[in-house]
Image (cartoon, rainbow, N blue to C red):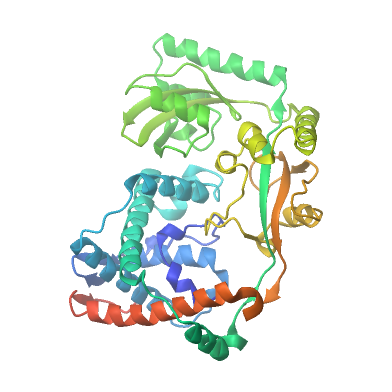
Amino acid sequence: MKKVFLAFLSAATLVTTPFNGTFASSHPDGIVAIVGKEIILKSDVDEQEIMVRMQFPDIKREPQFRKRLVDNMIDQKIMLTKAKIDSVSVDEKAIDEMAAAKYGSLRAGFPSVSDMESRFSRPVNRLKQDIRDDIRNQQMVDALRRKRFKDVTVTHEEVMDFYRKEKEKLPQVPEEVSVSQIVKYPEFSSAARQEALSKIMFIKDKLKGGSDFAALARDYSEDPGSRSLGGDLGFVQKGELVSSFETAAFSLKPGQVSDVVETRFGYHLIQMLEKEDASVHVRHILAIFDRSRTDEPKTLAQLRSIRADILAGKASFAAMAEKYSDDQLSSKQGGIVKSAATGSSLLEIAAMRPEMQKIIAQIKSVGDISQPERIAPPKGEPFFAMFQLNSRNVAHRMALEHDFARIEELATEKKRQQLFNVWIESLKKEVMVQVMSDI
C-alpha cells in the first residue's frame, strides 16, 4: 500500500476519519516551489500531509515522506499546467456533485462546522472552494492522463511475464462483498413533534414582528454548528442537504424566508442570502425533535413489513430502498452501498465497522436479506437498517486462474506508469520548475 499511496495525494481524496492532530498552518507560510505559473505553498504541503496521514496512518514513520509529497505535488502541477495549455475540458456539474459529496464526507468526521474550521484554519466557504478547485484540477489532470495513456495495452505474453516476475509480491485479494441497504431513522412521537413545532412557530411569530433572523438564530436555534454564526451555513451545493431542506432552500429568492420546513432533525426556518446555479448561501433556525422520545418499535415494525413484502415477491429490494430508505445516496441507486473513497460497490469486510461485519457474516447466501438491526454509530443518531447480499468474494492469493483480469490490469498499470514517468520527464523540459525550499 505504501508504494501506491502517492497516486492519491490530492485533496480530492478527503476521507471521513477524524484527524487527531492540529493543522500546521500556525507555522510561517512560504513558497516551496514554482511550477510554470502555479505555486506550491508550505501550507499546501501541510494540508496535503494531513489528508494523506488521515487516509494512511501507517506512513507516519515513512522516511523522506514530505520530499516525496512535494515531488508528487510538483508532478501534479506540471500536468495541470499542460492540461491548461491543451485546454482540457471537464464536466463542471459532475465536479459540483463530487465536491458536495467530498465536503459531506469530511464534515461527517467533525462534531461541528466550527470544529472543522478550527482544524483547517479556514472558514467553511473557503474550505468548500478549495475542495472544488482541487477536484477540478485533479479532473483536468486525470483527463489529460487518460487521453495520453488510454490506448496502452498489454499482450498475453506481457501479462505472463509480469506475473512471473511479480507473483510473490502480488497482494492478497481481501474478502469483499456487495450489499444493498434500507435505512430508517426512528420516527419521533407526536408529543416531541408538537413541542418542536411550538418552538418554531414562536420564532416565526417573532420574525413576523420584525426581529432579526440572525439574532433569533443566536438566541433560539438548536443547531450547535451554526447557532453562534447566526444560523449561517455558508454556500451549500445541490445534493449536500436533506431533500426537503434543499428543495425549500433552492426555491427561495435572496432575502426571502421559508415557511416551516420539516426534516428528520426537526423544524427549520430558512433564509436565502445568495444564490448561484448549483449552490445557495443560506442560514437557518432549527427546533430539534427530542431524540429521547422516538417510536423505535414502530420503525422496526415498518422494516419488518418491508422485508416480508420483498420476500413474498411483492416488490424488489431496490424498489423498496428507493421508496423507503432514509439514506439519500444509496436510495437513488436501489440501496447499493458504495465506497466513499473509491466509488466501488465492492466493500472490504475488514474495513467495515465491527457491527456491520457481524451483520454481513450472518447473511449466508447471495440474495438473502438480514433481519432489521438497530445501529448506533460512534457519531450521529441511531438508526435501523437491513441489508441484502448481492455478491461475496472470499479472500485469496491473487492467481492467474481466478484473477487474470486483475493481474492484466496491474500489468497494464505498471506499463502506464513507466510511460508516464518518461512523459513527466519530457514535460519538465517544457514547464519551468523552480524548487525554493526542500522543507
Residue under the image location 17 percent in, 76 percent down: 430
User: Taking the image as drawn, is residue 104 in sight?
Assistant: yes
Q: Quadrant of residue 272?
A: top left
Q: Residue at x 73, y 30 (%)?
A: 292
Residue 122 appears in the figure: no
* Quarter of the view holding residue 85: bottom left
Locate residue 160 relative to residue 126 in the image: left or right: right
- Give coordinates of residue 258: x percent, y percent: 44, 19
Q: Quadrant of residue 297?
A: top right
Q: Looking at the image, which residue sits at the far front?
A: 156
Q: Nearer the viewer, residue 40 or 100?
A: 100
Residue drawn at point x = 42 percent, y = 10 percent: 208
Residue 55, percent from left and from top? 53, 64
Q: Residue at x 45, y 30 (%)?
A: 231
Quarter of the N terminus within the rendering: bottom right
Quick check: 371 above or below 155?
Answer: above
Residue 309, x across and y down, in percent: 77, 33
Q: Nearer the viewer, residue 253 or 372?
A: 372
Q: Position of residue 138 (x, y in %)?
A: 35, 60
